[in-house]
Image (cartoon, grey):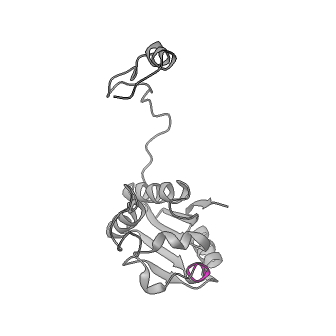
Amino acid sequence: MTELSELEQQSLDEIPHPSLPDGSNIYGSTKVFPDYKAENGETYFTLVHGIAHESSVSFVAILQATRALRKGFESAIYFYGPGSLNCLATRGFPTTGNSAFPGEHNINNSLKTFIAEGGKVFCCRFGLSLHGAREEDLIEGVIPTHPLDVQDALIHYARKGAIINSTYMF
């Protein structure tokens, strides 16, 4: 064990660590809003303009879209700009599919689950091209789209009365 100075040991001993055992409640569990489910024909549309692993924006947007899907909403996610990089199946190190750190494939796995459960994922080809990503590197089931589709997709889902979640990073 590392030798500690008297002051280092004093600092450690001031407050016991951890102060609470695993499983301790430190937050209440009251849900304030009703647990809404989709009504017939309701749609949930998510726009993502955030880079994978640069913040939680992209990952949380996928989780929210999946939750909406499981509540019965027709749910779709549209990745554009740098968000397009979230759709790459080629993530990994030292080879594709290998996680260089825990969670490296959270986005990939979550998108695969979303698609398998009936969600639609769109990815802007121009967003891919901005970063040198290839269309053939998309996760299976991701639908490549024309750059002019971003606005028209938004209009399409707005006209359907969709709940629109637009996430943006940068």
Q: Residue at x 39, y 69 (%)?
A: 92
Quarter of the image with the N terminus is top left
Q: Position of residue 99 (x, y in %)?
A: 35, 63
Query: Is 74 above or below relative to 36?
Result: below
Work out whether residue 165 or residue 56 is closer to the camera in this orientation and state it.
56
Work out whether residue 55 or residue 69 is closer to the camera in this orientation and state it.
55
Q: Residue at x 39, y 57 (%)?
A: 101
Quarter of the image with the C terminus is bottom right
Q: Position of residue 146 (x, y in %)?
A: 58, 85
Q: Position of residue 9 (x, y in %)?
A: 45, 17
Q: Quadrant of residue 127?
A: bottom right
- Is 40 on the left or on the right of 169, as rendered? left
Query: Is 64 above or below relative to 113?
Result: above
Residue range of the region highlighted in magenta in the rendering: 126-131
- Is 24 on the left or on the right of 168, as rendered? left
The tally of labels here is 0
Query: Is 118 above or below relative to 132?
Result: above
Magenta highlight on residue 129: yes
Q: Position of residue 12 (x, y in %)?
A: 45, 19
Query: Is 129 above or below relative to 79?
Result: below
Q: Residue at x 54, y 83 (%)?
A: 145
Would you say the magenta stretch is mainly helix, strand or loop? Answer: helix
Magenta highlight on residue 95: no
Taking the view exactly as shown, the residue that stands out farthest to the right is: 170
